[in-house]
Image (spheres, grey):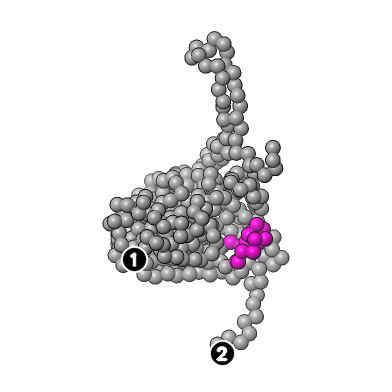
Amino acid sequence: MHSDVVVTGKSTLIKYPDDDPHGRRIAWVKERPDRAMWAKILPRILEPLAGALRPSSAPVAGPADRMVFIPVGDPHLDLRTRHPLKSWDIDIAIETHAATLHELLDRAPTAGRCVLAMMGDNLHANDRTAKTPRGGHSLDVSCSLLEASLKGCQMLVEVVDRARAQFPRTDVVILGGNHDMDSVTGLVTGMAMAYRDEPRVRVDTREGAFRSYRFGRCLLGLTHGHTVKSLKALSGIMPGRWGELWGETDHHHWYTGHRHNDAAVTLSDGAIAESIEILGPLDRYASDGGYSERRSARLDVWDARRGLTDRTFHRLAPAVGDEVELGDVSGW
């Protein structure tokens, strides 16, 4: 077997007895180690979360036609880096993301609802092999998949609890990416179970790489971005998949992750598509590939009739070289 082949399953040929009552002779049985692993891991993730939360009274209602939308780019929570000046691991990642999201919520206006959208690659690893599922790239991880899933759920619960205390309604969307196309299941299931008795919190349990979200005359498309070659390749997907919603709305907007940088284009179908930055540092693969390191998160304010009306950034310093000599900042 070639060294660059990624094994995702094992098939075994079995032979039935000659007197099999169903007339069977042979059959192939396929095993998926990753699915067997998740069957063991999921109960341990859910145990401390299930039933722990109870419905809460709604806060003072904000404007029903205003929505706070927070897209979180590629957290890679269990990534490990060893920079000369600053390292990064699961605990640093959790602290950084939680603090940033709380900061954005502190600066949020009153609104009728809040949407927290985790844009994929929430976990750096998809399984215990610590390799990307498709490309087989080796990954530097800081903890086990169980620890990453549990701490990720706990961080999300903390943030969502803050949001539900602030807004009458909170929706949670957790996308899978090219790093966590299977391991994202733990986060989605954990959050769905945690808020199963809270009517003011909805967790999106739809499957698929593309998700729609309608708010009044606004239609948002959400996708990690690894299944399209470029932002421009999103053109036509929204009217093609969600034609009725497209016809009933005026503002069409795509949010994507995957590329780790801010970029925006106007598509040939008239929609706007953008990718968003991340809060974590570069891993070894990205650093060797010459990617830039700009770190930020954002909060967008949507009006049900007028579309995107405001945007707030929270920007972090680069992971390496935080101490900067400002010099002359007089402007000339």
Quarter that holds the N terminus: top right
Residue occupying the point 50% across, 44% down: 185
Q: How far from the left and from the top, in percent, is residue 287?
A: 65, 62
In the rendered structure, the answer to whether residue 56 lies left or right of residue 233 reads left
| In the image, residue 72 above or below residue 187 | below
Disc 2 marks which residue?
332
Q: Which mark is residue 66?
A: none
The residue lying toward the viewer, choosing from 63 and 249, is 249
Residue at figure coordinates x 65%, y 75% from the top left = 323
Residue at 63%, 47% in the rendered image? 136
Q: Mark 1 points at which residue?
A: 307
Q: Is residue 60 visible?
A: no
- Most distant residue in the top direction: 19
Q: Is residue 323 magenta?
A: no
Residue 325, image quadrant? bottom right
Disc 2 crowd rating (10 Å Cα; few below 14, some 14-19, many 20+) is: few
Q: Is residue 281 inside the magenta stretch?
A: yes
- In the rendered image, residue 23, in percent from the top left (x then y), is placed at 50, 14
- Which quadrant would the C terminus be assigned to in this image? bottom right
Q: In the depicted view, which residue is nearer to us: 251 or 102?
A: 251
Q: Which amino acid does label 1 sit on?
A: Gly
Relative vertical location of residue 124 with respect to residue 84 in this rendering, above or below: above
Number of callouts: 2
Q: Is mark 2 on a helix, strand or loop?
A: loop
Coordinates of residue 55 in the picture (x, y in percent)? 38, 50
- In percent of width and height, residue 131 lies at 63, 47
Q: What residue type is labelled 2?
A: Trp
- Crowding at label 1, few (<14), some or many (≥20) Cα neighbours within 10 Å? many
Question: Residue 195, relative to residue 64: is it above or below?
Answer: above
Residue 152 vs residue 308, the one in the foreground: 308
N-terminal of the pair, mark 2 or mark 1, is 1
Start and end of the magenta stretch?
280-293
